[in-house]
Amino acid sequence: MLRRNVRLRREYLYRKSLEGKERLLYEKKRKIKQALEEGKPIPTELRNEDAALRQEIDLEDERTAVPRSTIDDEYANASEKDPKILLTTSHDPSAPLKQFVKELKFVFPNSQRMNRGGQVISEIVETCRSHDFTDLILVYEHRGVPDKIVISHLPFGPTAYFQILNVVTRHDNKDKKEMGTVSEAYPHLILNNFSTKIGERTATILKHLFPVPKPDSKRIITFANQSDYISFRHHVYRQSGGPKSIDLKEVGPRFELRLYQIKLGTIDQEEAQTEWVLRSFMNTSKKQKVLGE
């Protein structure tokens, strides 16, 4: 199993290394196409390769004309089966953290909660791989307050690191009777304002934690981005007075997420390449929006 994982990871890294060459070839073909469309002479540096590049251009179609990033290959087969998630915590979790993870188990369908005990990260990841888990979620705390959540997609990554803010669990809510029980139906997803490249990447990581719902599902999960803070909300709805009258009821929990790092490997790979990281100088840039406008 270990040799197989090493081999598969090496093959993935090799495919990723080809991106630079494919992008350079694409730029050359784009310049030739532009020159032909505008009736201009072929650029001098491309005249020796003109015949070969024109032949490749003639053989291309809509799918092969633009090179596709291999970074998203991790989710290429995600639609073939429902996600299977393992939820766990840091060592020796407090009672509030245990309660929060119990509620997250109902948020993510097909998830299993595990008491971590003395297991290290590498052991947990290997267990996930051997039992066909698609994602590993670890929740950390600071003085009894959940403060970090790590989502690692298996078997190759990526791994997203989020800060958790303003956690309000169902257990803390005074209107428990009004909230009712948690539906276990697969939820519909609302992903709002993830318009940048990093935003789309983040939305991909989040949406593949949930299976495809049935059309008549009354459960809604929302990830709404505003100023790079992602608000998580969990609702159910019912139509009380016809198709145009919808009543929303929040069932919790609720919290905010702030992305601060994405790595191209799993959580146990310290040598994994960093795809994006929040730098300190980004906090001073008022106009910059990382995830969306």
Image: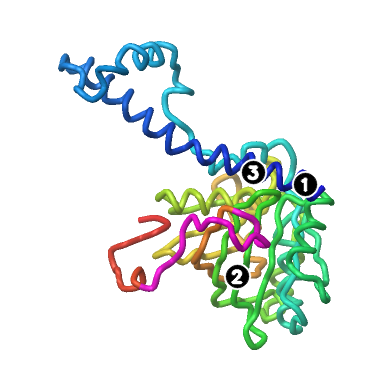
Check the image and report above or below for 148 versus 236: below
Q: Residues within 10 Å of mark 2 (few under 14, many from 20)?
A: some
Tell me residue 42's x, y (percent).
21, 18
Look at discs 2 and 1 and give the one toward the viewer: 1
- The disc label shown at residue 254, or none: 2
Magenta stretch contains residue 278:
yes
- Please provide percent x and percent y for residue 184: 77, 55
From the viewer's perspective, is 194 left or right of 70? Answer: left
- Disc 1 residue crowd, few under 14, some 14–19, many 20+, Cα 10 Å: few
Label 2 or label 1, whichever comes before in sequence order: 1
Residue 114 or residue 180, whichever sits in front: 114
Residue 143 percent across, percent down from the top left:
64, 88
- Mark sitting on residue 10: 3
Label 2, secondary structure: give it.
strand
Mark 1 secondary-structure assignment: helix
Indicate whether 144 appears above or below 195: below
Q: Quadrant of residue 24?
A: top left
**What secondary structure predominates along the stretch shown in magenta?**
loop
Q: Amino acid at mark 2?
A: Arg
**How far is mark 2 from mark 1, CA to CA?**
42 Å
Q: Earlier in the sequence, mark 1 or mark 3?
A: 1
Which residue does the image show at 45% across and 17% down from the upper left?
Answer: 61
| Along the viewing direction, whichever of 207 and 188 lies nearer the viewer | 207
Quarter of the image with the C terminus in it:
bottom left
Q: Is residue 216 magenta?
A: no
Amino acid at pointer 1: Arg
* Image: magenta residue range: 265-280
